[in-house]
Amino acid sequence: ETALASLARGSVVIHTRAAARQDSCRALMASPAASSVRPPRPKKEPQALVIPKNAAEEQKLKLERLMKNPDKAVPIPEKMSEWAPRPPPEFVRDVMGSSAGAGSGEFHVYRHLRRREYQRQDYMDAMAEKQKLDAEFQKRLEKNKIAAEEQTAKRRKKR
């Protein structure tokens, strides 16, 4: 029922913004141009809720979802960069003095600096260990490669 029709009958109409918005929406929907602007959305078929019981089922569900549309690009995340401690500052403003009378807040500053330094030392130790293991692995690979070539040469000689 429009506001004009109700006024014609003599009833009082309180027109709010929400009512005006509803009237304008109804008028837009009633016009033939509005229906040609946006086609109705296709209805999605309801999917059954499947709760995976283990990791294999979860992986299966993910693969099925990916294979529904094989043309769609799959986002492959980049490898996270390894954590490294922040480099030391170029200029240190709060140099801790050796004089007595440090305030109670200085301990927390010292504790933070000490923790950061220990973290940096642990990182350097871990990197040295990793480099050592990598070098040992490369030596072992080279040794195995030489042994395999010798075996191949020996067998080739027998033929």
Image (spheres, rainbow, N blue to C red):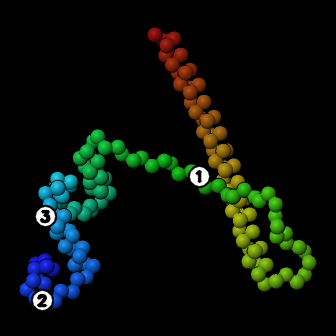
Q: What residue type is labelled 2?
A: Ser
Please tell me whether mark 1 or mark 3 is closer to you in this view.
3
Q: Which amino acid does label 1 sit on?
A: Glu
Depth check, mark 2 against mark 3: the one in front is 2
Between the C-alphas of marks 1 and 3, the distance is 61 Å
Residue 40 seen in render: no
Question: Where does label 3 land, which residue?
Answer: 30
Relative height, residue 70 to residue 41 (above, below): above
Residue holding disc 2: 11
Mark 3 crowd level (few <14, some 14–19, many ≥20, 10 Å Cα)? few
Residue at (66% x, 50% y) in the render? 127
Q: Can residue 59 be seen in this snapshot?
A: yes
Above or below 41: residue 23 = below
Is the N terminus in the top left, top right, bottom left or bottom right quadrant?
bottom left
Reading the image, the residue beneath label 1 is: 82
Q: Position of residue 114 (x, y in %)?
A: 75, 69
Element type where label 3 sits in the image:
helix
Placement of 136 over or under 9, stated as above or below: above
Q: In this view, does 54 lie to the left or right of 131?
A: left
Residue 136 location, quadrant: top right
Q: How crowded is mark 1: few (under 14 residues within 10 Å), some or many (20 or more)?
A: few
